[in-house]
Image (cartoon, coloured by chain):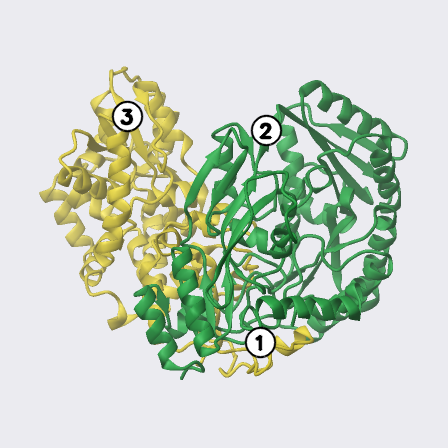
Amino acid sequence: MTKIPPAVIADLRALLGERVLTETGALAAYGRDATPLFRHAPDVVVQPLTTEEVAGVMRIATRHRVPVTTRGAGTNLCAATVPLSGGIVLSTTRMTALTEVSRDEMLAVCQPGVTAGALNRAAAAVGLVYVPDPGSKEASTVGGNVATCAGGLRGLKYGVTRQYVLGLEAVLPDGEVIRTGGRLVKDVAGYDLTRLLVGSEGTLAVITEITMALVPNPAAARYGVAYFESMADASEAVRDIVASGPAPATLEFMDAVCIAAVEDFAHLGLRLDAGALLLFGDDGEPDAVDRSVARMAEVCGKRATHIELAESVAAAEDLLAARRCNLPALARSGSMTILEDVTVPRPKLAEMVAFVAATADKHGVRIGTFGHAGDGNLHPTAVVDGDDQAATEAAMAAFDEIFHHAVDLGGTITGEHGVGAAKLPYLEHRLGPEQMALLRRIKGAFDPLGLLNPGKLGS
Amino acid sequence: MSEQTGPEQSSPELTSPEQTSPEQTSPGDGGPKGIFSKDLLDACISCGFCLPACPTYAMTGQEQSSPRGRITLMRLLETGDLAPDDATLAEESSLCLGCRACETVCPAGVQYGHLLEEWRDEQWSGLKRPWIVRPLLLIANRKWVLRTLGLVRRSARRRSGAADQPTLMLGCFERGLFPSVSRGIAALDPDLAVDPDQGCCGALHAHNGELEQGRDLARKLGERLPGTIVTTSGGCAAHLADVIGRERVVEASEWLLKQNLDVSERPLRVGLQDSCHLRNGLGVWKEPRELLGRTATYVELPSAGSCCGAAGTYALVRKKESKAILAKKIAEIEAADLDLVIAVNPGCLRQLQTGLRKSQSRTKAVHIVDYLRGHKA
C-alpha cells in the first residue's frame, strides 16, 4: 500500500525507467540519514541523471502534489534528508558529472552528486584546492555540502561552503530552471539568490549544478598541540591567538572526556592528565607558516602545561588524526551517538564548554565536547545506550538546555551541520518570530505548494 | 508499508524530535530476533563514511547497496520491521561482494564481514542458498574428495617437517584449479610440512550461509595442523585467522618475504591485484608488492586494492555484476601495458585469467607463488 497515487509511480517510470525504486526494503534504507532518532520512509526513490530529468520529476510532483526530499549521500547530522512526509526522495548520487575544472578561472563546475573528496582531487590535479573540509568529505556530496552550507576544520581562516559557491543552477518546484550567480567574483546584480539557496536544505529548489571557487594549494602546512589544565585556560589561549595576528587555518580543541576516549581508541600518546588540548596549525608559504606556528606556540606557552610541535609530516598526521577520530572514539563507548553542533562567540567558548559539562552531569549523560575553537563551533557529543529510552530522553533534555544556552550567549544552534528536522524546534529561539515569518514567506515564494522537504526550514 | 516507522505526517509542521522517533511507533514487534550479534550491529553510527569504499554502491548509487544501507536492512530484519522474505533483503545479501573494503574506512570499527556472515547464515539457509553454491559447499566438506582431487591434479605431496616448521594449507579449490601453486610453494620452501588429509578451512561455508559449519571446519583444520599454518589464498587466510587466531596464520607472501628468497630480476612490467580478504581482513598488502618490486618493474594498478569481482562464489552467483566489475579491471590492466598481473588468491586468479583470455590480452595472470617459483635464481 502506498500513500501516493499509482499514477505518480507510472509517470516517474515513464520518465526514468528503472531508476525508480519502490521496493519496501529499498525505501526503508532511504528512511534515515546519519542522524539518530529520525526515521521515515519515502514512498518512492528516484535517481535522475540530468537537470531535465530533475525538472521532469518536479513537474510530476507538482501535478500530483507529492512532497519531494532531495538527498545526496545522507551524511548529515540534523535529519535534513529524512522524508518526514514520505513522498519522493530525489537522490542525486548518480548526478556525478564534473563538467569543468578551470585553472585560469580557479573554479570547478559539477553536478550535485560529485563527492567533496572527488572535487578536491580534481582540483588538486591542477594545483588548486576545494577548501571546505567537512569530516565527511570523502562520502558527502557537493550538493549536500551546498544545501547545508557545510564547514570543517579550516573554517576560521577559510570560512564555510557559502564563501566558495559562485553560481548555481536549480530547479523550482514547478519544473522551471533558474541560474543564479555565475562565474564572476564581482557580480552584484539583483538579490543574492545563490546565497539564499546555499544552506536552504532543499526547501526552496533542487540544486542541479554548482560553480565552485577553488584556491591555490598552500605550499606548506604545520601543526602543534598544546595541553592545558582547564578548558578555561585553553579558551583564553584561543582568544590571545586570534588577537595576536592573522587567523590561523586550524585551531581545534578537545575536552578531557574526548582526550581520554581518543587515547583509549587510537593510542597516539596524548597526555591524559590534561583538562583540554588545543590543536593549532597554519598553511601557506613555508616561512609564513613557521612564523604563524611559532607565534601560536608562544601565545599558548603563557598558559599551557605542555606544548609539542609536529616536526614531521607523520607527526602532524597523528595530531590531525587525534582530532578527526573524536567521533568514532566516543562512538565506541555506546550504542547511540548524538553529535551536536552549536556555535558561540569565541570569548564565551570556555563558559559554553563548562555549561555542557555541568548539564551533562545534571542529566546523568556522558557528553564529550570537541570542536573548532577558532570559530567558536562546539560539537557536544552524547553517547548513550540506544535501547534505554530514559537515557535517550535525558540526552535530549540536556541538548535542549544546551541549544537554548548557546543562543542566550549570543551564539547559534548550528555552525555547520544545518537545521534539518532535528534543530527546527530551536530555530525560532535563534531567529525570533519576525524572521521566522519572513522565512516562511520566502519559502512560499519559491515553493507555494510546500512540496520541497516539508518539515524543515520555512515550515 | 511495513517498514514505515515514523508517524503519519499529514502536515509538515513538526515541532519536536520525539514526534518522529521511530521506536514508539514501530509496526513490527520490535523485538530482537537474535540473528545478529547485538554489539556488532550497534557499532554502526550510520555516518556513511563507508559509502565511497563500496563497489556495489559505486555501481548503483543506491543506499540499500551500501554497507550503511545494508546494516539498516539488517537492523530492520532483526527487529521484525522487515519481513524475512523481503525482496531487497534477498537481493542485497547476494549483491554484496563481501570484500570488506568498508571496514578499512569505518571510523567506528564496524565488523561488517561478520555481520554479512550472520546475515547470510539467516538469509541463505537451506533451500534459499543460491543453487550454484550448494555443490561447492558439499565438495569442500568431504576430505576424500579433496584428497582425490589432490592426487588427480597433483598438488603438493605429503611430507613431514621439523617440529617447529609450519604446515602448508592446501586450499580446496586451489587443488582443483591451480595445483601448481601448492607444488610451487613447497618447492620454494622445502621445510614446509604438507598433510594431504587436512580438509577445508570452511571460508566458503562461512561466506555462504553456513557460518557454524565454516567455523567448525576452521577449528578442525587448526587442530589437524599444529603450529603455524601457511596459506596461499587470501580468503582462507582471513577466515582461518578469524577462527583460530591471527598469530597462527601466515599468508604466502608474508612467509616468502621472511625467507629471503634469492630471486633474479627480470625485464618485466608486473602489476598486482590484491585479495580483498588479505588486504581488508588481514591488512597484508605491502608484502606482495615488496616481493614483486624486487624482481621486476612493479606497476601499481589504480584499483589494485578494490575487488576484481571474483569474491568467492560471487562470480557464479552474480555473473552480470561480476563481469561489469571485471571489465573495468581488465581495461585498467590493458592501459598499464603489463606483462603479468599477479594474484594472491585462487578466486582472483581465475577471474583475471578469464577476463584476460576473453579480451585476448597479451597480459597473463599468475599466482604470486608460481611467479616467484619461475623467478627463483
Q: Are labels 2 and 1 assigned to the same chain? A: no
Q: Measured from the top left, where is residue B152 in percent x and y?
A: 9, 44
Q: Are labels 3 and 2 assigned to the same chain? A: no
Residue B196 appears in the figure: no
Q: Is residue B11 above or below residue A419?
A: below
Q: What amino acid type should be assigned to the residue bearing mark 2?
A: Pro
Q: Which residue is mark 2?
A: A216
Q: Secondary structure at mark 2?
A: strand
Q: Residues within 10 Å of mark 2 (few under 14, many from 20)?
A: some
Q: Secondary structure at mark 3?
A: strand
Q: What amino acid type should be assigned to the residue bearing mark 1?
A: Pro
Dot 3 or dot 1: first in sequence order is 1
Q: Nearer the viewer, residue A171 or A248?
A: A171
Q: Which residue is mark 3?
A: B270
Chain B palette colour? yellow
Q: Are marks 3 and 2 in contact (CB under 8 Å)?
A: no
Q: Secondary structure at mark 1?
A: loop
Q: Which residue is mark 1?
A: B22
Instruction: Look at the image and tell me in which quarter the C terminus of chain B lies.
Output: top left
Q: What amino acid type should be assigned to the residue bearing mark 3?
A: Val
Q: Measured from the top left, where is residue A166 in percent x and y?
A: 58, 44
Residue at the image point whose x is 19% and y is 36% from the top = B156
Q: Nearer the viewer, residue B332 or B232?
A: B332
Tell me the mark number nearer the camera, choosing from 2 and 1: 2
Real-space Cα separation, disc 2 to disc 1, in angstroms: 46 Å
Q: Is residue A119 above or below residue B69?
A: above
Relative placement, left or right, of B18 versus A272 is left
Q: Nearer the viewer, residue B205 or A424?
A: A424
Q: Chain in green? A: A
Q: Residues within 10 Å of mark 3 (few under 14, many from 20)?
A: many
Real-space Cα separation, disc 3 to disc 2, in angstroms: 36 Å
Residue at the image point whose x is 55% and y is 78% from the top = B6
